[in-house]
Image: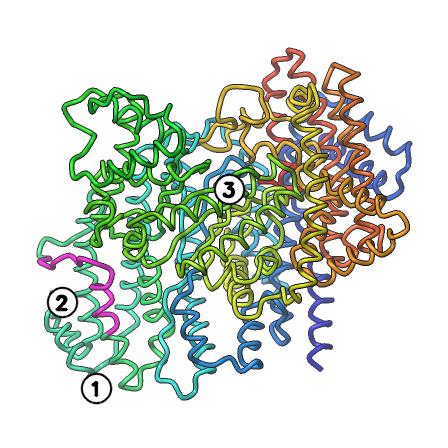
């Protein structure tokens, strides 16, 4: 019966998806006709029809008709067409997101893997002991970390309108009366018209403060509401597994992180002032939320002592309140909450003065010195309500507020500090020279650096002197750490906790950060003493293939340092290590990156287990498959056994943040998936291979990886002229000029692939529809592995298929490539290749890419047993197929506009059209960042 109900819900959801897409499309058509006129609309409709016909029939005449239509457009008409096609994809995305919500609801009766309800059921069915569950959540940490990388192509104004459209569509599902539907249609028409009349692009580049403010909108719309509600509901679900236990209190294990305002790696605009502003704005956001919730609670909790008893603790709070109105003397909860509200207002003014807090002249309350102090009266109120028949009054708002304070404190999200190791070396070198040392620290070998740094860390005196003249770099770096100290003193230790070292290559890279912390007052005591206190956890980031291979050796040396155990013990007896998906992919290719990450994780887990130190891995994932993207649940479940162990941090980057968290319902689904994956990977790992079988699989992967990396690096780094090909045949230069974020697209002003950031590298390949970082090298690796087998080819193929069925990492890898291939189009990519004037170079490189694509397609088809892309994921396959007819015209127009722009045309409409196409293609591909 349940299965029939689910099937019926799915059919209903699919029908509603089609209806919503048709409705939104017609509303956009109306908006276009209203503003642009019938002729412009007819032109757009003709292009749309020709593109759809070509994709459905692959008719050459339809292709020629499409090209004629596009070639005839003036720059002004091009802008109009691009906006229409782009916004159509935006609207389709909204309808599909709502469809995803409905599918999740249809599975509520029969939860599937990836849903938190399914994980709870598994705990119950497997009879996991209560003590194990309690210990898991006591030690757990799940932390999404928002970053401001330059791939978010949508303006906040556009996102706000689209959020309103989703709300109206969701409300429409429950309407039956014609009058209601008619009103809803008018509201939708207004929202879609507003979308059409809203500028899609920014005119000026985002500042760091803009990025901070943009990120905070996701807290207002989603995180501040959803996280406490989710924790409340999970706590109630877990209580059903603990019938003999007393009332269970779920720890606040779901905590937000942020790099915005603290990530200095390659971003000259981030300094101590941006860090202070980031923490201040976060505090303002969370304090306003608490004050608003308290104001609502005062209105809601009018419980009278004439009817219900109240604890003495609450009566004492009421008597201490400034509010002693005769009209409310029998309503102690209201009086008590008034007092809490007053104290929190004073707290807000003391932490973030000048932010418009309205404090009455007669308020004499003292500020709370910590979030824990704020929790005490609220917990007393909750306890009193539960004791006196008011438990039902706790859940709607008070319980949610308590969970929010436990999760967000006064800081909202922990801001990570990040800087590149070479910057630290330069600062240490200058500090030593200005302190009177005559040697060149940067010229030391590694052993000499380690010896010097350890010796310096044992000294009580500082190298930095306020009476000495230093370079701007030294002042900036020390200034950031001084800002860290101030923010921690004001907002608590959770405000800033991690210092991430980009390009970690040696042990001295970690020790340099310890020494810099000492210079800013963040290290107390001397190295080797039992009472040493290091405020910021030092987190190495291993990014390149070589760095990943060296990671176990470097961390082994770190754990072996004399005195390091005192440091680790005083930071909770745990050590965080960050792994970079983006740069390892750009360095070694898709397959090798995944494999080296896997091996590094296994080696690190073994190392830390032997050292009896808790390891937490921080995954630097992006949106694209080439940067570690793809389905989150499958990615976490594909981690080697023992590597999750109840704790995970991972970055949420670019437009993926908007896709996941702009809507609170979708946001909750993603957060639940993160928790479910962490729980399942820790207690029910998918990788249950016998040791001998795992060794056999790993041996095959080692062989495949070596071939794939050779193939990839041969193309990208060893082919003369490849950089010229890349910079000419992708819109990388135009992306660099798009006002996406505050960070430059390259670390250095060169045209070397090595200096290009991994994010615009992947973004550019997506725009030209090659998506090369997500598949290149796999075809050569598997083809060569099979061809070299001779008569044993079928045996090797059978082994690969066994790996696909029984080994999560290989299954996830192949499935992700399958998805990337579904979005790849070599016909479109060839148009981009013609942007390179050098025909010989163009043909040489494109033919190699084409050959590798053919090999990759063949081996994926062979393994999956189907030539149809995404055969096992029909919903995703249909979504991609449906959006391709609207992507192709955008790609054609982008090539045409770039060609004209690079040839010297200066028409303002032309300059506008190019970034509009970038926006539209990104919306069509979705996971681009």
N-terminal label among 3 and 2: 2
Looking at the picture, tell me which residue is in the foreground, 123 or 337: 123
Q: Is residue 492 above or below residue 137?
A: above
Secondary element at tag 2: loop
Give the residues drawn in magenta, as a range: 363-379
- Near mark 3 (Cα within 10 A), the count class, few <14, some 14-19 or many ≥20, is some
Q: Which mark is residue 323?
A: 2
Q: CA distance from mark 3 to mark 2?
A: 64 Å
Would you identify the image quadrant in which residue 809 lies? bottom right
Element carrying mark 3? helix
- Which of marks 1 and 2 precedes in the sequence? 1
- Nearer to me, 256 or 641: 641
Q: Which residue is mark 3?
A: 550
Is 101 on the left-hand or right-hand side of 351? Answer: right
Residue sitting at 27 percent across and 86 percent down? 388
Q: Quadrant of residue 271?
A: top left
Viewport quadrant of the C terminus = top right
Q: Is residue 355 visible?
A: no
* 414 versus 803 height, above or below: above
């Amino acid at each position: 019966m349940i299965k029939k109900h689910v099937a019926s819900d799915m059919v209903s959801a699919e029908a509603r998806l089609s209806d919503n897409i048709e409705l939104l499309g017609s509303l956009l058509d109306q908006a276009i006709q209203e503003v642009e006129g019938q002729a412009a609309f007819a032109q757009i409709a003709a292009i749309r029809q020709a593109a759809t016909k070509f994709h459905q029939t692959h008719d050459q005449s339809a292709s020629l008709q499409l090209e004629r239509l596009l070639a005839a457009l003036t720059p002004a008409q091009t802008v109009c067409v691009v906006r229409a096609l782009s916004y159509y994809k935006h609207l389709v995305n909204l309808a599909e997101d709502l469809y995803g919500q409905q599918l999740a609801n249809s599975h509520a009766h029969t939860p599937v893997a990836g849903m938190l309800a399914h994980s709870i059921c598994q705990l119950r069915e497997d009879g996991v002991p209560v003590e194990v569950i309690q210990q898991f959540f006591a030690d757990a940490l799940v932390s999404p970390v928002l970053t401001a990388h330059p791939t978010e192509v949508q303006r906040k104004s556009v996102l706000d309108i689209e959020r309103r459209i989703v709300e109206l569509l969701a409300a429409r599902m429950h309407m039956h009366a014609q009058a209601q539907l008619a009103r809803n249609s008018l509201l939708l028409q207004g929202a879609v018209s507003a979308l059409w009349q809203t500028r899609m692009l920014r005119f000026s580049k985002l500042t760091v403060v803009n990025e901070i403010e943009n990120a905070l909108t996701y807290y207002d719309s989603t995180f501040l509401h959803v996280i406490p509600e989710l924790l409340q509901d999970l706590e109630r679900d877990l209580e059903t597994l603990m019938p003999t236990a007393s009332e269970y209190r779920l720890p606040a294990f779901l905590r937000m992180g942020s790099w915005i305002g603290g990530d200095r790696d390659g971003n000259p605009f981030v300094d101590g002032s941006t860090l202070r502003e980031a923490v201040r704005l976060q505090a303002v956001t969370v304090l306003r939320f608490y004050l608003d919730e308290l104001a609502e609670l005062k209105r809601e909790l009018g419980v009278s002592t004439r009817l219900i008893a109240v604890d003495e603790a609450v009566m004492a709070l009421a008597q201490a309140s400034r509010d002693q109105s005769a009209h409310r003397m029998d309503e102690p909860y209201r009086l008590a909450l008034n007092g809490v509200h007053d104290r929190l207002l004073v707290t807000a003014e003391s932490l973030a003065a000048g932010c418009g807090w309205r404090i009455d002249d007669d308020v004499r309350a003292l500020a709370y010195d910590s979030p824990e102090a704020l929790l005490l009266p609220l917990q007393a109120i909750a306890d009193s309500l539960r004791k006196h028949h008011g438990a039902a009054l706790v859940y709607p708002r008070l319980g949610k507020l308590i969970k929010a304070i436990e999760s967000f404190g006064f800081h909202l999200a922990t801001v990570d500090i990040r800087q590149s190791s070479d910057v630290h070396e330069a600062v240490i070198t200058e500090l030593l020279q200005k302190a009177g040392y005559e040697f060149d620290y940067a010229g030391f070998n590694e052993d000499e650096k380690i010896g010097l740094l350890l010796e310096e860390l044992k000294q009580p005196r500082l190298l930095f002197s306020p009476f000495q003249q230093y370079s701007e770099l030294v002042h900036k770096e020390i200034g950031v750490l001084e800002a860290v100290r101030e923010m921690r003193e004001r907002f608590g230790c959770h405000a800033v906790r991690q210092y991430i070292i980009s390009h970690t290559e040696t042990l001295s890279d970690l020790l340099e950060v310890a020494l810099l912390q000492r210079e800013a007052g963040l290290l107390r005591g001397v190295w080797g003493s039992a009472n040493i206190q290091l405020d910021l956890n030092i987190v190495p980031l291993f990014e390149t293939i070589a760095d990943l291979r060296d990671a176990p050796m470097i961390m082994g040396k770190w754990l072996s340092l004399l005195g390091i155990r005192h440091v680790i013990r005083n930071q909770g007896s745990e050590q965080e290590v960050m792994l970079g998906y983006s740069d390892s992919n750009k360095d070694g290719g898709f397959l090798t990156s995944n494999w080296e990450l896997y091996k590094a994780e296994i080696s690190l887990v073994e190392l830390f287990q032997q050292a009896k130190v808790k390891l937490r891995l921080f995954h630097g994932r992006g949106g694209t498959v080439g940067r570690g993207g793809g389905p989150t649940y499958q990615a976490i479940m594909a981690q080697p056994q023992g590597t999750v162990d109840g704790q995970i941090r991972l970055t949420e980057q670019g437009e993926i943040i908007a896709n996941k968290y702009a809507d609170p319902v979708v946001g909750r689904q993603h957060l639940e998936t993160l928790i479910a994956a962490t729980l399942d990977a820790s207690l029910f790992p998918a990788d249950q291979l016998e040791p001998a079988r795992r060794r056999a699989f790993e041996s095959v992967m080692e062989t495949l990886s070596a071939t794939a990396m050779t193939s990839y690096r041969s193309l990208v780094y060893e082919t003369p002229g490849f950089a010229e090909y890349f910079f000419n045949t992708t819109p990388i230069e135009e992306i660099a000029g798009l006002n996406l974020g505050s960070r430059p697209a390259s670390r250095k002003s060169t045209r070397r692939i090595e200096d290009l950031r991994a994010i615009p590298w992947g973004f550019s390949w997506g725009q030209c529809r090659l998506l090369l970082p997500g598949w290149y090298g796999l075809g050569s690796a598997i083809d060569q592995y099979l061809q070299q087998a001779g008569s044993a080819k079928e045996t090797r193929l059978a082994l690969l298929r066994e790996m696909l069925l029984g080994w999560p990492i290989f299954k996830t890898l192949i499935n992700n490539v399958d998805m990337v291939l579904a979005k790849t189009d070599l016909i479109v990519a060839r148009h981009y290749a013609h942007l390179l004037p050098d025909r010989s170079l163009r043909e040489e490189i494109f033919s190699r890419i084409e050959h590798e694509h053919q090999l990759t397609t063949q081996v994926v088809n062979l393994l999956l047993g189907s030539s149809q892309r995404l055969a096992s994921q029909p919903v995703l396959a249909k979504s991609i197929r449906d959006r391709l007819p609207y992507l192709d015209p955008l790609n054609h127009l982008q090539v045409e506009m770039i060609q004209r722009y690079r040839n010297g045309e200066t028409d303002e409409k032309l300059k506008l059209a190019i970034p509009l196409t970038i926006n539209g293609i990104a919306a069509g591909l979705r996971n681009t960042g």
